[in-house]
Image (spheres, grey):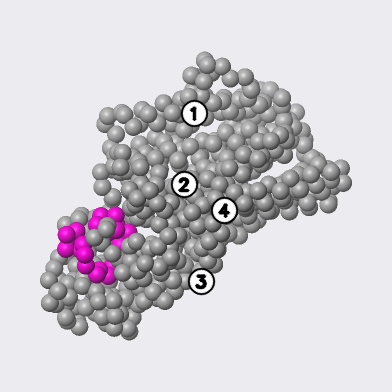
Amino acid sequence: MPIEIGGNQPKVTFLQPAKVFTWPKLLSPSLSDLFFLFITAWLFLVSPVGWQRLLLDADTALHIRVGQYVLSTGTVPHQDLFSFGKPGQAWYAFEWLSETMYAAAYNLAGLKGVALLGGVLVSLYVTVLLKYTVWKGASGLFALVVMLMATTGASIHFHARPHLVTMLFLAIALWIMEHHRRRGGRLIWTLVPLTALWANFHGGFFIFFALLGLRVLGCAAEAWFWPEIRSERRREAVLLACLAAACALASLANPYGLGLHRHILELLSSPWTMKNVSEFKSPSFRTEELYTAMLLLFAGLACITSLIRKRNLVEPLWIVFLAYCSLTSVRHTTIFLLVASPVIAVELSAWWASLAAGQPKTSLLRMFNDVSQQLATGLAGTSLFIPLIVAGLALAPGIRWPDAFPEGWVPVPFVEANAGRLANRRVFTSDQIADYMIFRNYPRQQVFFDSRHNYYGEKIGDEYLALSQGGPEWKNLLDKYAFDLILCPADAPIASLVRAAGGWHVVDSNGKYILFERDGKS
């Protein structure tokens, strides 16, 4: 049945997918299944960076190692495993299920398995979002264009890390919430077990509660301002409030109970993290990806007036909230694009359809609109083609899979060449290199400071920065923690200070990185 997009705007109808699925249809790829193949090829097969882009963040290495600990011991850690700077204290492996998943992929197929799993999660969440956008009422061409732009903007976070699960789960949650508004039914309650899983995969389940709370507020506001829909919106607000309570209880089904929630709140409110960790800083609009995100941010804000005219206050609240979040922290840019892009595509489709209304069938406006609507029908289908694509990628010869972590933040060949020397030693190095050292040498390797910034806290975090930047107390800190080795860029301030002060000698250097050893510690 066609869905009408009304309000005070001209009524527009879009063809909706047929609801009857047969085996021939399941075996015949839809256009959205082909879109999955296109996204995979575009991002990972023909891109110069290829599958390596998924491994450019050394946090992936640490996640694999944590997952391997869970798989080997059958337990989720509650105390620190990796630090000599703050050993044995309470620690929350709050992404343990994702880490176990990545570790299982690594144990099965090495870094190929990790890259394939990460790539499939990326392509799957983008494809689900496209299907949702078309189901929501966008015409095909606008849905494709907006989705490609959103994918470009979000690609800054396309790393094989637990947050990719949040991207997929959030796309599914948005679809389920909108499905309930339009068609009712009990499907909405599947969000309860989804939340229980989500709380073990990634701390991003908190954004779901934020959006769910704003949806309750939006429903209540719609009931207040428009009497003709008051009864319907009140019922929705009450049901969603009950759902939120049920999901909150479900989120306690994790190894840490309520402690997980306290830990995530501490992480999100940590002044040191906000000030010093790049992902928590405001975006710098200097790249193609962030320029694209900025364009979609403006487009999302421009949709607010039209949405209010259609008696929709939920999506304007989402857009304003996430626009603010994305301008204060670059890590929220991807969430904004995920939530706002379907709204933008639907509004652009309605605007174009209103321009084409009443035009002759032979006009460019009308032909473009007709083609776009027909394309939407093909994009809405589902088949078994995606699992076949994944199997084909896993088995096909000739694909260039990563066999080592790429050099980026970590000088991987340099660390590998000195892996034996680094093991069982107290090494001062960057958090990213420390992540890789844990992956490479644990349990022999303990580190001073790694990417679990919130675990170490402000005091050790400031000491780490003082050492990295050559602060006045650098020498005392080297003695305080009894460092044996220093691995740093050759042009780092600490390298110049150590050379000048003496007491250390160079044991290896490749021009970009240098490894110092304390005299008498060979």
**In which quarter of the view is residue 78 placed?**
bottom left
Kind of residue sitting beneath label 4: Leu
Labels 3 & 2 near each other (Cβ < 8 A):
no
Residue drawn at 40 percent across, 44 percent down:
101
Q: Residue 342 placed where, x, y %?
A: 61, 41
Dot placed on the residue nearer the N-terminal end, 4 or 1:
1
Nearer the viewer's eye, disc 1 or disc 2? 2
Extent of the magenta region: 418-441
Nearer-the-camera pick, 521 or 26: 521
Cα distance in 3D space between marks 2 and 4: 21 Å
For label 3, the SS is: helix
Q: CA distance from mark 1 to mark 2?
A: 20 Å
Query: Looking at the image, which is closer to me, 33 or 463?
Result: 463
Pointer 4: what residue?
252
- Looking at this view, is 94 or 403 the one in front? 94
Residue at x-position 25% and y-position 43%: 403
Question: Which residue shows up at 76% across the image and 48% down it?
Answer: 238
Identify the residue position indicated by label 2 in the image. Answer: 164
On screen, residue 250 versus residue 416, left or right, reads right
Q: SS for tag 4?
A: loop
Quarter occupied by the N terminus:
top right
Image vertical order of residue 145 relative to residue 378, above or below: below
* Element at label 2: helix
Q: Are marks 1 and 2 in contact (CB under 8 Å)?
A: no
Question: How far apart, in angstroms, are the residues tagged by discs 3 and 2?
Answer: 25 Å
Residue that badge 3 annotates = 271
Determine which residue is flagged by label 1: 33
Asked whether 42 falls inside the magenta stretch, the response is no
Q: Is residue 273 left or right of residue 495?
A: right
